[in-house]
Image: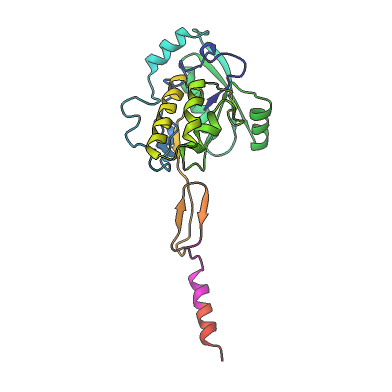
């Protein structure tokens, strides 16, 4: 869930860093219904060599803390609560997720008005018209941190629709794009994630499961977690089709 920062300073916006992150429970239905793995930051499991299984368990990432959320809200411009617009899509688990977030933020006296849209309308309102105080977002098909951190969150990138601007974050993700040493690049990315978590332009709630449904007769299928399918080593001919083909071959004169 991202927030719009285009018209005000992050530190003065009612949900900037303050109540947004610690008020969002990461064990709510989208995880309990086996829709994904709890996320404490933007580095996802397919990012081999960068994703850490232990990250977040010691509260170094995003985590739920209602008392802290109340404390942050008191320090914001709207200590008694505020009304905001949540812009999202109307497919998948977006409607249920929006309702859960609405209920969670209501405990802080933050009234969330939900607007769910078809994909073309959502993109127009989000990217062109810059509507919404909060926006439901989904990043997918990323196998490397550079596919997420730079295009989604660098201040000069189009996909940074919330207009988050942090010079330190930009300084860290830029050299990570060209650094050939993986350990050095991992350090750049880890430092950038720390800046992201501190300033909180987005609340990252889960690493969504990617689902592929196969018939029993499909053999040798290798899943690629980027919404892609590698069919080079796969066979999908139905057994009865293979049997009929063999019979035709043996029956030739």
Query: Residue 208: x percent and y percent?
Result: 46, 39
Query: Residue 108: x percent and y percent?
Result: 46, 14
Q: Nearer the viewer, residue 139 or 173?
A: 173
Q: Is residue 79 above or below residue 155?
A: above
What is the image's colouring? rainbow
Q: How many marks?
A: 0
Q: Is residue 128 above or below residue 247?
A: above
Q: Quadrant of residue 38?
A: top left
Q: Give the magenta range.
A: 232-243
Q: Is residue 149 left or right of residue 61?
A: right
Q: From this viewpoint, is residue 104 visible?
A: yes
The reply to whether the magenta stretch includes residue 205 is: no
Q: Who's the residue at 35% across and 25% down the image?
A: 60
Q: Quadrant of residue 159?
A: top right
Q: Nearer the viewer, residue 13 or 64?
A: 13
The reply to whether the magenta stretch includes residue 240 is: yes
Q: Nearer the viewer, residue 26 or 224?
A: 224
Q: Is residue 7 above or below residue 161?
A: above
């Amino acid at each position: 869930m991202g927030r719009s920062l285009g018209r005000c300073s992050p530190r003065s916006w009612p949900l900037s860093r303050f109540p947004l992150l610690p008020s969002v429970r990461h064990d709510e239905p989208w995880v309990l219904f086996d829709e994904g793995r709890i996320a404490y930051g933007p580095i996802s499991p397919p990012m081999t060599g960068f994703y850490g299984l232990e990250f977040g368990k010691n509260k170094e990432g995003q985590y739920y803390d209602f008392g802290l959320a109340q404390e942050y809200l008191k320090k914001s411009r709207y200590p008694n609560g505020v009304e905001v617009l949540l812009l999202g899509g109307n497919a998948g688990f977006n409607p249920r997720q929006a309702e859960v977030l609405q209920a969670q933020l209501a405990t802080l006296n933050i009234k969330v008005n939900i607007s769910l849209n078809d994909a073309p309308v959502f993109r127009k309102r989000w990217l062109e018209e810059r509507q919404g105080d909060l926006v439901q977002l989904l990043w997918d098909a990323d196998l490397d941190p550079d596919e997420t951190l730079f295009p989604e969150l660098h201040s000069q990138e189009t996909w940074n629709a919330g207009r988050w601007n942090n010079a330190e974050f930009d300084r860290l993700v830029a050299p990570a794009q060209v650094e050939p040493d993986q350990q050095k690049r991992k350090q750049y990315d880890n430092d950038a994630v720390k800046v992201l978590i501190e300033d909180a332009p987005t609340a990252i709630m889960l690493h969504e499961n990617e689902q592929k449904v196969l018939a029993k007769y499909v053999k040798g299928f290798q899943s690629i977690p980027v919404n892609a399918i590698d069919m080079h080593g796969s066979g999908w001919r139905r057994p009865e089709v293979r049997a009929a083909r063999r019979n035709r071959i043996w029956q030739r004169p």
